[in-house]
Image (cartoon, rainbow, N blue to C red):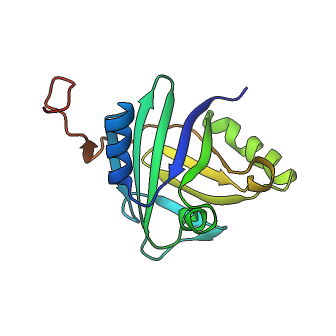
Amino acid sequence: MRNYRQIALVVRDVDATMRVWWEVLGIGPWDVRHFTPETVRDFHVDGERVDEPFEFICAVTWVGDVEFELIQPIDGPNIYWRHLEKHGEGLHHVKDVMPDEEIPSVLADFKRSGHEVLQTGWIDQDVHYYLDTERDLGMVYEIGNGGPIGPPPRRYPEMNGVGRAPS
């Protein structure tokens, strides 16, 4: 059974996008994190371990049972650059969350059907696997365990302590 928990877009400017989503749609607040070699372990792109510097920003917020994620590539290898070059800003992936013990068999099923892992890595206790499903789905498909991640270093908009944005 599938457990779709996330819809992600790649954007050129995460701050501008968060602001518009907040001001126009009232969606937020957003938890904002910068991911670098210091915060992502065992990071691989196209099957190769990434040993050089990299950085990307992810901002997330929940709307009901679905997490929206905005991703902005900053530096180094990652699949988000490719998305911007080929498609521009927009839908990048949906994420299917499952227990750790189910991930190997799901990855094997996708591999048998010709869908290789494009990118993977660990952030705290959360692992992600982006699968090359664009030819079939028109987007990347992500599977992961949805494990806990530490508190964000930044939120947008900054809250005044009572659950509302400052006036």
In the rendered image, the quadrant that contains the N terminus is top right
Front one among 157 and 101: 157
Instruction: Indicate the position of residue 40 as horizontal and vertical percent values.
Output: 44, 58
Q: Residue at x 48, y 34 (%)?
A: 67
Q: Is residue 133 above or below residue 151?
A: below
How many numbered discs, if any? 0
Q: Is residue 124 above or below residue 102?
A: below
Instruction: Indicate the position of residue 27 as horizontal and vertical percent values.
Output: 38, 32
| Residue 115, picture quadrant | bottom right
130 displayed left or right of 164: right
Front one among 64 and 48: 64
| Residue 6, picture quadrant | top right
Q: Is residue 163 above or below residue 23?
A: above
In the rendered image, the quadrant that contains the C terminus is top left
Q: Is residue 61 above or below residue 131?
A: above
Instruction: Indicate the position of residue 29 as horizontal and vertical percent values.
Output: 31, 35
Q: Residue at x 74, y 54 (%)?
A: 134
Instruction: Indicate the position of residue 133 as horizontal and vertical percent values.
Output: 75, 52
164 displayed left or right of 24: left
Front one among 51 and 143: 143
Q: Residue at x 44, y 58 (%)?
A: 72
